[in-house]
């Protein structure tokens, strides 16, 4: 039951980070817009793959690592969002939010690979 709960929480955190962070990015150029769209589509595909593959029966350390890292990334995004509400758009917010989304995707890929190997 705990494995299933952590799996669902990790999936929803990754999906939330995928949809939440690009809202803070100022979208002036076409290439940045394409980058945001690719990031969101990649996140949705990763979470769909993770839901299909990643549910295991035993509780391993990679689940805890992924959960803690996603929680830290979500906390950092909330701090960036708070700064975004005070200051508005800036290049630092754009770079930080896109980097955090990329790190979140890499962490989720680690989760999928770990669950595929240890299953």
Image (tube, rainbow, N blue to C red):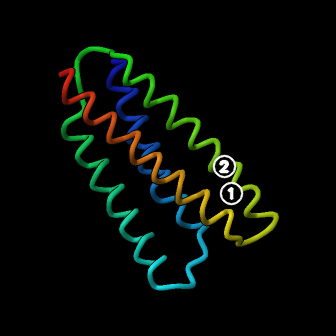
Locate the C terminus by quadrant: top left
Say few, some or many: other residues with alpha carbon within 10 Å of mark 1 (under 14 / 14 to 19 / 20 or more): some
Compare residues 98 and 84 and report the one nearer the observer: 98
Left/right placement of residue 48 relative to residue 11 reads: left
Locate the N terminus by quadrant: top left
Say few, some or many: other residues with alpha carbon within 10 Å of mark 2 (under 14 / 14 to 19 / 20 or more): some
Quarter of the image where one finds residue 81 = bottom right
Image coordinates for residue 8, horizontal then vertical, percent: 37, 35
Image coordinates for residue 56, horizontal then vertical, percent: 23, 23
Image position of 64 with respect to 106: above or below: above
For image coordinates 50% across by 38% down, the residue present is 70
Number of callouts = 2
Quarter of the image where one finds residue 6 = top left
Image coordinates for residue 7, horizontal then vertical, percent: 35, 31
For image coordinates 48% across by 76% down, the residue present is 32
Residue wearing tag 1: 81
Residue wearing tag 2: 78
For image coordinates 46% across by 85% down, the residue present is 30
Q: Secondary structure at mark 2?
A: helix
Compare residues 45 and 34 and report the one nearer the observer: 34
Quarter of the image where one finds residue 96 = bottom right
Image position of 81 with respect to 56: above or below: below
Q: CA distance from mark 2 to mark 1?
A: 5 Å
Left/right placement of residue 78 relative to residue 110 reads: right
Left/right placement of residue 110 relative to residue 95 reads: left
Compare residues 9 and 42 and report the one nearer the observer: 42
Image marks 2 and 1: residues in contact by CB distance under 8 Å: yes
For image coordinates 23% across by 46% down, the residue present is 49
């Amino acid at each position: 039951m705990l494995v299933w709960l952590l799996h669902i929480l990790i999936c929803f955190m990754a999906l939330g980070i995928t949809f939440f962070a690009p809202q803070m990015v100022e979208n002036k150029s076409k290439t940045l817009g394409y980058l945001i769209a690719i990031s969101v589509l990649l996140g949705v595909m990763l979470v769909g793959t993770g839901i299909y593959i990643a549910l295991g029966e035993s509780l391993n350390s990679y689940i805890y690592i992924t959960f803690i890292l996603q929680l830290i990334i979500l906390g950092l995004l909330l701090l960036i969002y708070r700064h975004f509400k005070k200051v508005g758009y800036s290049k630092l917010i754009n770079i930080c939010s896109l980097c955090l989304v990329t790190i979140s995707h890499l962490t989720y890929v680690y989760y999928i690979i770990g669950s595929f190997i240890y299953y």
